[in-house]
Image (cartoon, rainbow, N blue to C red):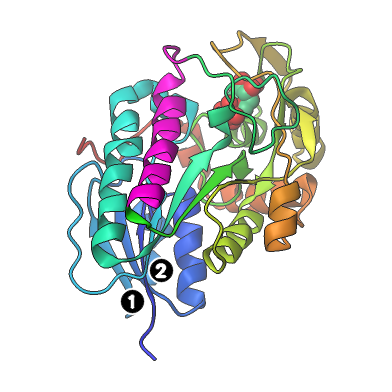
Protein backbone atom coordinates (compact mmCIF):
# COMPACT_ATOMS: atom_id res chain seq x y z
CA UNK A 1 0.00 0.00 0.00
CA UNK A 2 1.23 3.52 -0.86
CA UNK A 3 2.48 5.50 2.09
CA UNK A 4 0.20 8.24 3.37
CA UNK A 5 1.50 11.75 2.72
CA UNK A 6 1.41 14.45 5.37
CA UNK A 7 2.07 18.11 4.53
CA UNK A 8 3.17 19.99 7.62
CA UNK A 9 3.56 23.75 7.78
CA UNK A 10 6.08 25.03 10.32
CA UNK A 11 7.80 21.65 10.07
CA UNK A 12 11.25 23.08 10.81
CA UNK A 13 10.10 24.66 14.06
CA UNK A 14 10.33 23.36 17.60
CA UNK A 15 7.11 21.30 17.70
CA UNK A 16 6.92 20.82 13.91
CA UNK A 17 10.32 19.17 13.69
CA UNK A 18 9.53 16.70 16.48
CA UNK A 19 6.35 15.90 14.60
CA UNK A 20 8.33 15.32 11.38
CA UNK A 21 10.59 12.88 13.26
CA UNK A 22 7.63 10.96 14.60
CA UNK A 23 5.78 10.86 11.26
CA UNK A 24 8.88 9.58 9.44
CA UNK A 25 9.31 6.95 12.16
CA UNK A 26 5.66 5.95 11.65
CA UNK A 27 6.42 5.58 7.91
CA UNK A 28 4.55 8.52 6.50
CA UNK A 29 5.81 10.50 3.55
CA UNK A 30 6.39 14.00 4.92
CA UNK A 31 6.33 17.30 3.03
CA UNK A 32 7.71 19.91 5.39
CA UNK A 33 7.00 23.58 4.61
CA UNK A 34 8.71 26.37 6.51
CA UNK A 35 9.89 29.89 5.74
CA UNK A 36 12.62 29.59 8.40
CA UNK A 37 11.82 32.83 10.25
CA UNK A 38 11.93 31.06 13.58
CA UNK A 39 12.28 27.50 12.32
CA UNK A 40 15.70 26.16 11.42
CA UNK A 41 17.13 23.65 8.99
CA UNK A 42 19.25 22.38 11.89
CA UNK A 43 16.07 20.91 13.40
CA UNK A 44 15.43 18.72 10.34
CA UNK A 45 18.84 18.32 8.68
CA UNK A 46 19.09 14.71 9.88
CA UNK A 47 15.95 13.94 7.83
CA UNK A 48 17.28 15.31 4.52
CA UNK A 49 18.77 11.98 3.50
CA UNK A 50 15.47 10.15 4.11
CA UNK A 51 13.67 9.48 0.83
CA UNK A 52 10.28 9.97 2.49
CA UNK A 53 11.13 13.50 3.60
CA UNK A 54 10.80 16.58 1.41
CA UNK A 55 11.60 20.09 2.58
CA UNK A 56 10.28 23.16 0.83
CA UNK A 57 11.10 26.70 1.92
CA UNK A 58 7.74 28.38 1.72
CA UNK A 59 5.80 31.15 3.45
CA UNK A 60 2.31 29.84 4.27
CA UNK A 61 0.71 33.25 3.95
CA UNK A 62 1.22 32.68 0.20
CA UNK A 63 -0.61 30.10 -1.93
CA UNK A 64 0.59 26.55 -1.26
CA UNK A 65 1.21 24.48 -4.37
CA UNK A 66 1.93 20.79 -3.89
CA UNK A 67 1.85 18.27 -6.71
CA UNK A 68 0.39 14.82 -6.15
CA UNK A 69 -1.48 13.29 -3.32
CA UNK A 70 -1.72 14.69 0.20
CA UNK A 71 -3.68 12.79 2.85
CA UNK A 72 -3.23 15.06 5.84
CA UNK A 73 -2.44 18.76 6.26
CA UNK A 74 -1.02 19.82 9.62
CA UNK A 75 -0.92 23.60 10.04
CA UNK A 76 1.75 24.32 12.63
CA UNK A 77 3.42 27.41 11.14
CA UNK A 78 3.35 30.35 13.55
CA UNK A 79 5.49 32.68 15.56
CA UNK A 80 4.63 31.26 18.97
CA UNK A 81 6.83 33.03 21.49
CA UNK A 82 5.65 36.39 22.89
CA UNK A 83 9.06 37.92 22.08
CA UNK A 84 8.71 36.83 18.43
CA UNK A 85 5.12 37.84 17.90
CA UNK A 86 5.57 41.20 19.58
CA UNK A 87 8.37 41.84 17.11
CA UNK A 88 6.45 40.53 14.08
CA UNK A 89 2.75 41.17 14.81
CA UNK A 90 1.66 41.44 11.18
CA UNK A 91 3.48 38.29 10.11
CA UNK A 92 1.93 36.50 13.10
CA UNK A 93 -1.53 37.57 11.99
CA UNK A 94 -0.76 36.53 8.42
CA UNK A 95 0.44 33.05 9.42
CA UNK A 96 -2.67 32.54 11.57
CA UNK A 97 -5.23 33.99 9.18
CA UNK A 98 -3.92 33.76 5.59
CA UNK A 99 -1.78 30.73 6.43
CA UNK A 100 -4.74 28.84 7.85
CA UNK A 101 -6.85 29.80 4.83
CA UNK A 102 -4.15 28.55 2.44
CA UNK A 103 -3.58 25.35 4.41
CA UNK A 104 -7.34 24.67 4.46
CA UNK A 105 -7.46 25.35 0.74
CA UNK A 106 -4.77 22.73 0.23
CA UNK A 107 -6.72 20.23 2.35
CA UNK A 108 -9.87 20.96 0.33
CA UNK A 109 -8.12 20.58 -3.03
CA UNK A 110 -6.50 17.30 -1.98
CA UNK A 111 -9.52 15.97 -0.06
CA UNK A 112 -7.16 15.65 2.87
CA UNK A 113 -7.76 15.64 6.61
CA UNK A 114 -6.67 18.78 8.44
CA UNK A 115 -5.31 19.79 11.83
CA UNK A 116 -4.83 23.30 13.22
CA UNK A 117 -2.27 23.90 15.93
CA UNK A 118 -4.17 26.41 18.04
CA UNK A 119 -3.21 27.57 21.50
CA UNK A 120 -4.22 28.06 25.11
CA UNK A 121 -3.85 31.78 24.30
CA UNK A 122 -7.37 31.64 22.82
CA UNK A 123 -8.47 31.68 26.49
CA UNK A 124 -6.56 34.96 27.05
CA UNK A 125 -6.26 35.87 30.74
CA UNK A 126 -8.79 33.27 31.81
CA UNK A 127 -11.37 33.80 34.53
CA UNK A 128 -12.32 30.12 34.38
CA UNK A 129 -9.77 27.79 35.94
CA UNK A 130 -8.70 25.22 34.83
CA UNK A 131 -9.63 25.96 31.23
CA UNK A 132 -12.12 23.63 29.57
CA UNK A 133 -12.72 23.63 25.82
CA UNK A 134 -16.18 25.12 26.40
CA UNK A 135 -14.74 28.31 27.90
CA UNK A 136 -14.84 31.17 25.35
CA UNK A 137 -11.94 33.09 26.80
CA UNK A 138 -11.05 36.55 27.99
CA UNK A 139 -8.91 38.13 25.28
CA UNK A 140 -8.02 41.79 24.85
CA UNK A 141 -8.68 42.16 21.10
CA UNK A 142 -6.42 45.19 20.71
CA UNK A 143 -3.66 44.41 23.22
CA UNK A 144 -0.07 43.52 22.39
CA UNK A 145 -0.77 39.80 22.44
CA UNK A 146 -3.87 40.12 20.27
CA UNK A 147 -1.87 39.52 17.07
CA UNK A 148 -1.31 35.97 18.28
CA UNK A 149 -4.51 35.35 20.25
CA UNK A 150 -6.89 36.74 17.66
CA UNK A 151 -5.09 35.18 14.70
CA UNK A 152 -5.55 31.78 16.36
CA UNK A 153 -9.15 32.53 17.29
CA UNK A 154 -9.93 33.53 13.73
CA UNK A 155 -8.02 30.46 12.52
CA UNK A 156 -10.32 28.29 14.63
CA UNK A 157 -13.34 30.09 13.13
CA UNK A 158 -11.99 29.40 9.62
CA UNK A 159 -11.48 25.73 10.40
CA UNK A 160 -15.03 25.40 11.73
CA UNK A 161 -16.41 27.15 8.63
CA UNK A 162 -14.52 24.71 6.35
CA UNK A 163 -15.81 21.82 8.43
CA UNK A 164 -19.40 23.05 8.15
CA UNK A 165 -19.36 24.31 4.56
CA UNK A 166 -16.89 22.03 2.79
CA UNK A 167 -17.11 19.00 5.08
CA UNK A 168 -13.33 18.89 5.47
CA UNK A 169 -12.41 16.42 8.19
CA UNK A 170 -10.77 18.89 10.57
CA UNK A 171 -9.19 18.87 14.01
CA UNK A 172 -8.21 21.74 16.33
CA UNK A 173 -5.73 21.30 19.14
CA UNK A 174 -5.19 23.96 21.78
CA UNK A 175 -1.59 23.56 22.80
CA UNK A 176 -0.62 24.68 26.31
CA UNK A 177 2.95 25.68 27.22
CA UNK A 178 5.28 23.08 25.75
CA UNK A 179 9.04 22.81 26.21
CA UNK A 180 11.92 20.57 25.26
CA UNK A 181 14.94 20.16 23.00
CA UNK A 182 15.09 22.41 19.89
CA UNK A 183 13.52 25.43 21.56
CA UNK A 184 15.63 28.42 20.63
CA UNK A 185 17.71 29.45 23.63
CA UNK A 186 16.90 33.08 22.85
CA UNK A 187 13.21 32.76 22.02
CA UNK A 188 12.29 34.65 25.18
CA UNK A 189 10.06 32.01 26.69
CA UNK A 190 10.44 31.24 30.33
CA UNK A 191 12.03 27.76 30.12
CA UNK A 192 14.87 28.60 27.71
CA UNK A 193 15.36 31.99 29.42
CA UNK A 194 15.81 30.44 32.87
CA UNK A 195 18.03 27.61 31.58
CA UNK A 196 20.24 30.06 29.70
CA UNK A 197 20.43 32.40 32.67
CA UNK A 198 21.25 29.58 35.11
CA UNK A 199 23.94 28.11 32.82
CA UNK A 200 25.62 31.49 32.45
CA UNK A 201 25.20 32.54 36.13
CA UNK A 202 23.04 35.49 35.12
CA UNK A 203 20.05 36.50 37.27
CA UNK A 204 16.84 34.58 36.61
CA UNK A 205 14.38 37.20 35.38
CA UNK A 206 11.01 36.62 37.03
CA UNK A 207 8.34 38.88 35.57
CA UNK A 208 5.90 40.42 38.05
CA UNK A 209 5.88 38.67 41.42
CA UNK A 210 6.21 35.28 39.76
CA UNK A 211 2.86 34.23 41.21
CA UNK A 212 1.38 33.73 37.74
CA UNK A 213 1.01 30.07 36.80
CA UNK A 214 1.72 27.92 33.76
CA UNK A 215 1.47 24.16 33.17
CA UNK A 216 4.42 22.78 31.22
CA UNK A 217 4.16 19.84 28.84
CA UNK A 218 7.22 17.98 27.57
CA UNK A 219 7.28 17.95 23.78
CA UNK A 220 7.19 14.15 23.28
CA UNK A 221 4.04 13.93 25.41
CA UNK A 222 2.41 16.53 23.18
CA UNK A 223 3.47 14.68 20.01
CA UNK A 224 1.90 11.47 21.31
CA UNK A 225 -1.44 13.29 21.79
CA UNK A 226 -1.24 14.80 18.29
CA UNK A 227 -0.60 11.41 16.65
CA UNK A 228 -3.48 9.86 18.55
CA UNK A 229 -5.82 12.62 17.40
CA UNK A 230 -4.71 12.22 13.77
CA UNK A 231 -5.94 8.65 13.94
CA UNK A 232 -9.46 9.34 15.15
CA UNK A 233 -12.24 11.62 13.96
CA UNK A 234 -12.96 14.41 16.41
CA UNK A 235 -13.69 17.86 15.04
CA UNK A 236 -14.12 20.08 18.10
CA UNK A 237 -11.21 21.85 19.82
CA UNK A 238 -9.17 19.68 22.16
CA UNK A 239 -6.83 20.88 24.92
CA UNK A 240 -3.40 19.23 24.85
CA UNK A 241 -1.07 20.04 27.72
CA UNK A 242 0.16 18.94 31.10
CA UNK A 243 -2.36 19.73 33.84
CA UNK A 244 0.26 20.05 36.60
CA UNK A 245 0.38 23.76 37.41
CA UNK A 246 3.40 25.71 38.69
CA UNK A 247 3.98 29.34 39.64
CA UNK A 248 6.86 30.98 37.78
CA UNK A 249 8.68 31.29 41.13
CA UNK A 250 8.34 27.53 41.61
CA UNK A 251 9.78 27.00 38.13
CA UNK A 252 12.73 29.28 38.98
CA UNK A 253 13.30 27.24 42.16
CA UNK A 254 13.27 23.98 40.21
CA UNK A 255 15.78 25.32 37.68
CA UNK A 256 18.13 26.34 40.50
CA UNK A 257 17.72 22.87 41.98
CA UNK A 258 18.80 21.05 38.81
CA UNK A 259 21.46 23.46 37.53
CA UNK A 260 24.36 24.30 39.83
CA UNK A 261 24.45 28.08 39.44
CA UNK A 262 25.32 31.33 41.17
CA UNK A 263 22.24 32.98 39.61
CA UNK A 264 20.01 35.03 41.87
CA UNK A 265 16.40 35.89 41.14
CA UNK A 266 15.54 39.40 39.94
CA UNK A 267 12.04 40.73 39.46
CA UNK A 268 11.11 42.56 36.24
CA UNK A 269 7.83 44.23 35.22
CA UNK A 270 5.04 41.92 34.17
CA UNK A 271 4.37 42.26 30.40
CA UNK A 272 0.97 43.66 29.37
CA UNK A 273 -1.92 41.15 29.33
CA UNK A 274 0.29 38.36 30.70
CA UNK A 275 -2.22 35.66 31.75
CA UNK A 276 -2.31 35.25 35.55
CA UNK A 277 -3.11 31.57 35.47
CA UNK A 278 -3.11 28.75 32.98
CA UNK A 279 -3.93 25.10 33.44
CA UNK A 280 -5.58 22.80 30.93
CA UNK A 281 -8.54 20.65 31.80
CA UNK A 282 -7.62 17.56 29.78
CA UNK A 283 -10.63 15.38 30.70
CA UNK A 284 -11.74 15.37 27.06
CA UNK A 285 -8.33 14.31 25.69
CA UNK A 286 -8.12 11.60 28.35
CA UNK A 287 -11.53 10.27 27.38
CA UNK A 288 -11.32 10.64 23.61
CA UNK A 289 -7.67 9.75 23.05
CA UNK A 290 -6.86 7.72 26.14
CA UNK A 291 -3.95 10.12 26.50
CA UNK A 292 -2.25 11.99 29.29
CA UNK A 293 1.27 13.36 29.73
CA UNK A 294 3.81 11.04 31.33
CA UNK A 295 6.89 13.22 31.83
CA UNK A 296 7.24 15.14 35.11
CA UNK A 297 8.54 18.70 34.88
CA UNK A 298 11.84 17.95 36.64
CA UNK A 299 12.63 15.03 34.33
CA UNK A 300 11.66 17.02 31.22
CA UNK A 301 13.76 19.99 32.31
CA UNK A 302 16.78 17.74 32.81
CA UNK A 303 16.36 16.31 29.31
CA UNK A 304 15.99 19.83 27.90
CA UNK A 305 19.04 20.98 29.81
CA UNK A 306 21.13 18.19 28.29
CA UNK A 307 20.21 19.48 24.87
CA UNK A 308 21.05 23.09 25.70
CA UNK A 309 24.39 22.02 27.20
CA UNK A 310 25.60 20.80 23.82
CA UNK A 311 25.32 24.35 22.50
CA UNK A 312 28.73 25.94 22.85
CA UNK A 313 29.11 28.48 25.61
CA UNK A 314 29.98 31.06 22.96
CA UNK A 315 26.57 30.62 21.44
CA UNK A 316 25.01 30.93 24.86
CA UNK A 317 26.90 34.14 25.56
CA UNK A 318 25.88 35.59 22.24
CA UNK A 319 22.21 35.56 23.11
CA UNK A 320 21.15 38.36 20.77
CA UNK A 321 17.95 37.62 18.97
CA UNK A 322 18.65 36.37 15.47
CA UNK A 323 16.08 35.57 12.86
CA UNK A 324 17.27 33.20 10.22
CA UNK A 325 15.53 34.74 7.29
CA UNK A 326 13.21 37.64 6.75
CA UNK A 327 11.02 36.55 3.88
CA UNK A 328 7.85 38.05 5.28
N1 LIG B 1 8.38 34.87 32.28
C1 LIG B 1 9.25 35.23 33.30
N2 LIG B 1 10.55 35.43 33.00
C2 LIG B 1 11.06 35.25 31.74
C3 LIG B 1 10.18 34.87 30.70
C4 LIG B 1 8.85 34.69 31.00
O1 LIG B 1 8.84 35.40 34.46
O2 LIG B 1 12.27 35.44 31.57
C5 LIG B 1 6.97 34.63 32.61
C6 LIG B 1 5.97 35.36 31.70
O3 LIG B 1 5.70 36.65 32.19
C7 LIG B 1 4.77 34.44 31.79
C8 LIG B 1 5.38 33.05 31.97
O4 LIG B 1 6.71 33.26 32.40
O5 LIG B 1 3.99 34.75 32.90
C9 LIG B 1 5.42 32.23 30.69
O6 LIG B 1 5.96 33.04 29.67
P1 LIG B 1 6.31 32.49 28.24
O7 LIG B 1 6.85 33.63 27.46
O8 LIG B 1 7.16 31.28 28.37
O9 LIG B 1 4.94 31.99 27.62
P2 LIG B 1 3.41 32.45 27.69
O10 LIG B 1 2.76 31.39 28.47
O11 LIG B 1 3.31 33.79 28.40
O12 LIG B 1 3.00 32.53 26.28
**Res 138 → quadrant:** top right
Q: Residue furthest front?
A: 165
* Mark 2 surroundings within 10 Å by alpha-carbon count, few (fewer than 14), some (14 through 19), many (20 or more): few
Residue 164 percent across, percent down from the top left: 40, 48
Which residue lies at the image location 74% right of the left edge and 57% below the top edge? 287
Marks 1 and 2, how far apart in space? 7 Å
Residue 317 percent across, percent down from the top left: 49, 33
Q: Are marks 1 and 2 in contact (CB under 8 Å)?
A: yes
Regarding ligand 1, which quadrant of the image does it lie in? top right
> Helix, strand, or loop for circle 1?
loop
Magenta stretch, main secondary structure class: helix
Which residue lies at the image location 62% right of the left edge and 58% below the top edge? 225
Which residue lies at the image location 21% right of the left edge and 35% below the top edge? 328
> Helix, strand, or loop for circle 2?
helix
Q: Is 324 located above or below residue 219 in the figure?
A: above
Front in this rendered view, residue 203 or 109: 109
Disc 1 residue: CB within 8 Å of ligand 1 = no
Front in this rendered view, residue 156 or 85: 156
Q: Is 287 located above or below residue 312 in the figure?
A: below
- Side (left or right) of 242 relative to 236: right
Looking at the rendering, the stretch of residues picked out in magenta corresponds to 141-165
* Mark 1 surroundings within 10 Å by alpha-carbon count, few (fewer than 14), some (14 through 19), many (20 or more): few
How many numbered circles are shown?
Answer: 2
Residue 34 is one of the magenta-drawn residues: no
- Side (left or right) of 123 relative to 24: right
Q: Which mark is residue 326?
A: none
Question: What residue is shown with label 1?
Answer: 49
Q: Which mark is residue 46?
A: 2
Camera sees residue 320: no
Amino acid sequence: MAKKTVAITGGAGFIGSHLCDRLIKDEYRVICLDNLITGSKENIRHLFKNKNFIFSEHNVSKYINIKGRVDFVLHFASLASPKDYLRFPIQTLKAGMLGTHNALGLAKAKKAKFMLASTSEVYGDPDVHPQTEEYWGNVNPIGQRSCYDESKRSAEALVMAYLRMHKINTRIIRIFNTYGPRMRINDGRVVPNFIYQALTNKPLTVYGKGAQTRSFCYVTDLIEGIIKLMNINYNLPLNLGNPKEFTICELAGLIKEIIPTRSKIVYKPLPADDPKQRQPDISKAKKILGWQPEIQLKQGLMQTLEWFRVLSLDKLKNNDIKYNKLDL
